[in-house]
Image (spheres, rainbow, N blue to C red):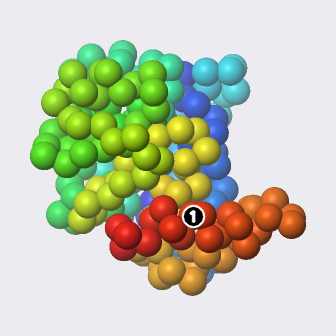
Amino acid sequence: MHIAILTFDGFNELDSLIALAILNRVQRPGWRVSIASPTAKVQSMNGLVIEAQSTLEEACAADAVLVGSGKKTREVVADAGLMSRLKLDPTRQLLGAQCSGTLILAKLGLLNDVPACTDLTTKPWVEEAGVAVLNQPFVAKDNVATCGGCLASQYLAAWFIARLEGIEAARNAIHYVAPVGEKDDYVTRAMANISPFL
């Protein structure tokens, strides 16, 4: 099971790295989560440089793909060469997008007639791409999910785990990362957000 997190230059650390950490709470043979980038290294919006663990082409062959966000997403969608490398297919993959990553799915035509969630900054661009934006943190239909707000990444990660490994695995992953003294509240909130879409 390979889950690739698409991470572009200017990425938001909260989106890619929180999802990476939560998804890696699943401890089973063959479970792999990778940062997939168009270049060997990418720099975050705050100057953090990380190395890619897989290519965009490997991500397109993954079982699940999470599209992270960042301050250069409009540059990504304007780059025809880069966008042509993204051969994503919801008939064979789970797909999810965080904040401005929703714009990438919209421009790839993967949100046709599907409402989406995104952050407040990206909302007008997603609407301009012809996608209705909901005022909620998470939504999914079939194999495609979107979320809005940096800390909604926990919901997207939990949805991926619930779909791929089961609800109990998702509950356990959120429980592990939740603050001490608030674990039950976090698990309850996360499951309330994703359960209608499982």
In the picture of the structure, the residue carrying the numbered disc 1 is 190
State whether residue 32 appears in this view: no
Q: Is 11 displayed left or right of 107 in the figure? A: right
Q: Is residue 82 above or below residue 33?
A: above
Q: What percent of the width, then of the height, locates residue 153? A: 55, 49
Please name the amino acid that badge 1 sits on. Ala
Q: Is 120 displayed left or right of 173 in the figure? A: left
Q: Residue at x 58, y 31 (%)?
A: 12
Q: Residue at x 86, y 66 (%)?
A: 181
Which secondary structure, mark 1? Answer: helix
Q: What percent of the width, then of the height, locates residue 54? A: 47, 47
Q: For the view shown, which residue lies furthest in the right direction?
A: 181
State whether residue 169 appears in this view: yes
Front residue (pair 185, 89): 185
How many numbered marks have been drawn onto this rendered protein structure?
Answer: 1
Q: Quadrant of residue 44?
A: top right
Q: Is residue 193 above or below residue 82?
A: below
Q: What percent of the width, then of the height, locates residue 14? A: 63, 39
